[in-house]
Structures are given as structure tokens and as C-alpha cells.
Image: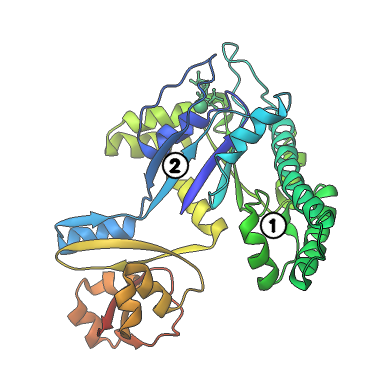
């Protein structure tokens, strides 16, 4: 799973990247450094922490997500530059759009989230229209008769073109499994799930108010995006605190979790992701899968041999396990289950796969 960060210049993208990945990439107020940062986010999960303290394994592995941070994009940039910037995100599974609310006279740029999000979505639509335009032209101008399959492709692309031309993201278009498969090779941007991160100023944190809020929320809803407010600067300060100080600080602000913790929660929710766990003396580990994944496919995520030689999945719910803290107690209560290949994994399942090769 990997995610790309997109936003206008100086909106706080690298600040967010650093927070998510615990890195210290350079943040400069006035020079957009044209570099790409790549890092890995460890997804905070209290359940893994709890399992780890019970099993005391040699290794504890939280779920992780790769993050790519790229230079800012603005509508007045030359088209070629915008294309280059976008191309860096061609292969990501989802987009985090950072919009800036914080006001800082030392940092130039828009502080109107609606203006920024409209601009970014416009650019995304434009990129996809370009990709579609090229392909349709090629098919239309082919010096041979196009195949039946290509004819079908052209019709789908023309439908998508119409959809995009009316300012709608492809993710909001009704597409069949087959059509989605056909489109998957094009690397469309607007087919990726989008989460908008509002980078609030320190003054906006407690009331969570910002300009054009109602219109902004409507825009988010219309385009089937998710949004979350955080404050980059504050999160950086929170990062410096000890565990105890952090709790008090957050409590005073009226929060239970840090912005980064809330963000990973929303990511999972919006992307339809869930976690299952494997446990043992060697390793306690979280695995990320899409909701609706079968036991067989989940097994393959661990190792193709386990999928190939799948016999059964032994499943215990985390919430059942944590009450007695031992498999023995779970079994006594009859909460230990044996499931087959087609079982749909639930969030928080602790699984032991039995296999034979
Ligand atoms: N006051 C305030 N300043 C912030 C906040 N987040 C970021 N900044 C400042 O805004 C400037 C730009 O932050 P970056 O994280 O580098 O922004 P960016 O979007 O990566 O910028 P480019 O990559 O150059 O487009 C820096 O000076 C940050 O310190 C915030 O929440 N509050
Ligand atoms: Mg940056």
C-alpha cells in the first residue's frame, strides 16, 4: 500500500510527511525543493501493542504504508512541470491532498481551502482527460481497423471523458468490475481514493473553523472524498512530548488521539482496509488487507506457499482473546473457530493458518 501527498506549494506537505514517517526532511519556507521524499508510516494500533506485551515476541511489526512526498503544484505552473510532478504519483494507491488553512505572514500562498481543493481537483481531472484524449486519438486515427475489444475500450473511455468533462472524478462513476479492470492500466489519478488533510493554524485547532467551511464540506461530499483537520505545527510539538505529557496536552485540547493517529484511522476507513494479526513467540504482526478478502487470499499475503497448501484458518477475535489473554481460555469459552478458504476475514481477527505443501 502506498500513498502520494499532493498539494499547493508551501501547504505543509513535507511537514506532514515528516510527522507520518518520523523523518526530518528539510522544510524551507521559500524554496520549493524539487525532490521526492519516500518513507514508511507505521500504523499505530493499540491491539498490536497489547498482543506484543502479552507474547513478548522477539519482533513486533505494525502495519505500514509507504508515503511519497513531492513538490507543490499550482495552476499557474507550466503544463510540462505539472505533468512531471503528477507522474511521480502514477503508481500510488491513494492520494492525500494537503490544503493549507494556517496563516503565516512569512509563508506565501493561499489559505483558502476551497480555492486550493478546487484547483487541485481541476488539475487531477485535467491529467486524466489528457490520458484519455491521447488514447482515444490513437484508436480513432489507427491506420487499421480496430479490434472489437478496442472498440469496447473506446466506448468506455468516451463515457469516462464525458464524466470528467462535467467536473466529476472517475471514482464517482458507476463502473463494472470488468470496466475497472480495463481502466486499471491507464494510471488514472481520479480513480484513486482521496483524503483531504486540512492543515489548520494553531488558532483554528480548538474550534476547527475555517473560511468557506460549508461549501468546502459540500465539495468533499460531492466528490466522495474524506477529510480530516490537523495542525502540522502542533503535531510537531506533540511529537516532542513524553507519553504522559502527550495525554495531558491532547486532553486539554479536547482530543483523545493525535492528528496522525486520527489520520491513519480515516485512511483505513476510507480505503476500506482492515487488519488481521498473526501471533507467536517470534513475531506479533499486523497485516493490512481490503475488507472482503477471503481467508485463502489473506494466506497468500503472508506467503504464496500458505495459499497453495491452505488447509484451514484457526480464528480468534482480538476482543475475545484480550479478555482472558490466553488461547486456553478462548477455547474453554468456545470462541476458537476453524474457518475454510472462503471465510471473509474480519477486522481484528487473530489467525493461524494451517497448510501443507
Ligand atoms: N504556522 C504554521 N506553519 C506551518 C504549519 N505547517 C507548515 N508550516 C510552515 O510552512 C512552511 C512550508 O512547510 P512545508 O511542509 O515545507 O510545505 P510543503 O507543502 O512541503 O512545501 P513545498 O514542498 O515547498 O511545496 C514551513 O515554513 C513550515 O514551517 C502549521 O501548521 N502552522
Ligand atoms: Mg515539501
SS class, disc 1: helix
Decide: is 215 above or below 318. above
Query: Is residue 68 shown left or right of residue 123?
Result: left
Question: Which numbered tag is attached to residue 260?
Answer: 2
Residue drawn at (72%, 37%) of the image: 123
Which of the pair 224/34 is nearer the observer? 34
- Tag 1 or tag 2, which sits nearer the N-term? 1
Q: Quadrant of residue 99?
A: top right
Mark 2 closeness class: few <14, some 14–19, many ≥20 residues within 10 Å: some
The answer to whether residue 322 is left or right of residue 113 is left
| Neighbour tally class for label 1: few under 14, some 14-19, many 20 plus, Cα within 10 Å | some
Q: Is residue 98 visible?
A: no
Q: Locate residue 44, reporting x and y percent.
A: 36, 50
Please give the label number shown on residue 171. 1
From what the image shows, is residue 355 above or below residue 237? below
The x and y percentages for residue 324 are 23, 74
Amino acid at each position: 500500500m502506498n500513498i502520494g501527498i499532493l498539494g499547493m506549494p508551501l501547504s505543509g506537505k513535507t511537514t506532514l510527511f515528516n510527522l507520518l514517517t518520523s523523518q526530518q526532511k528539510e522544510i524551507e519556507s521559500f524554496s520549493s525543493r524539487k525532490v521526492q521524499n519516500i518513507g514508511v508510516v507505521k500504523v499505530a494500533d493499540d491491539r498490536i501493542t497489547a498482543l506484543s506485551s502479552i507474547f513478548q515476541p522477539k519482533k513486533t511489526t505494525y502495519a505500514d504504508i509507504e508515503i511519497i512526498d513531492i513538490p507543490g503544484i499550482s495552476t499557474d505552473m507550466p503544463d510540462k512541470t505539472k505533468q512531471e510532478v503528477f507522474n511521480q504519483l502514477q503508481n500510488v494507491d491513494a492520494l492525500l491532498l494537503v490544503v493549507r488553512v494556517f496563516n503565516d505572514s512569512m509563508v506565501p500562498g493561499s489559505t483558502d481551502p476551497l480555492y486550493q481543493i478546487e484547483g487541485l481537483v481541476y488539475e487531477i481531472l485535467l491529467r486524466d482527460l489528457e490520458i484519455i484524449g491521447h488514447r482515444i486519438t490513437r484508436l480513432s486515427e489507427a491506420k487499421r481497423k480496430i479490434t472489437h475489444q478496442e472498440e469496447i475500450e473506446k466506448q468506455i473511455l468516451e463515457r469516462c471523458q464525458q464524466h470528467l468533462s462535467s467536473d466529476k472524478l472517475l471514482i464517482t462513476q458507476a463502473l463494472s468490475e470488468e470496466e475497472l479492470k480495463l481502466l486499471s492500466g491507464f494510471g488514472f489519478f481520479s480513480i484513486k481514493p482521496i483524503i483531504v488533510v486540512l492543515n489548520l493554524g494553531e488558532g483554528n485547532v480548538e474550534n476547527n473553523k475555517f473560511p468557506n467551511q460549508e461549501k468546502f464540506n459540500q465539495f468533499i461530499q460531492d466528490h466522495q472524498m474524506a477529510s480530516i483537520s490537523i495542525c502540522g505545527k502542533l503535531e510537531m510539538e506533540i511529537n516532542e512530548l513524553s507519553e504522559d505529557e502527550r495525554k495531558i496536552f491532547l486532553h486539554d485540547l479536547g482530543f483523545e488521539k493525535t492528528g496522525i493517529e486520527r489520520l491513519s484511522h480515516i485512511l483505513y476507513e476510507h480505503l476500506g482496509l482492515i487488519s488481521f494479526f498473526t501471533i507467536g513467540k517470534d513475531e506479533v504482526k499486523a497485516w493490512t488487507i481490503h475488507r472482503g478478502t477471503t481467508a485463502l487470499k489473506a494466506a497468500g499475503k503472508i506467503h504464496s506457499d500458505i495459499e497453495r497448501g491452505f488447509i484451514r484458518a484457526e480464528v480468534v477475535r482480538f476482543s475475545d482473546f484480550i479478555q482472558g489473554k490466553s488461547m486456553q481460555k478462548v477455547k474453554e469459552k468456545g470462541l476458537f473457530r476453524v474457518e475454510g478458504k472462503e471465510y471473509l476475514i474480519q477486522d481484528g481477527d487473530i489467525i493461524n493458518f494451517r497448510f501443507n505443501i
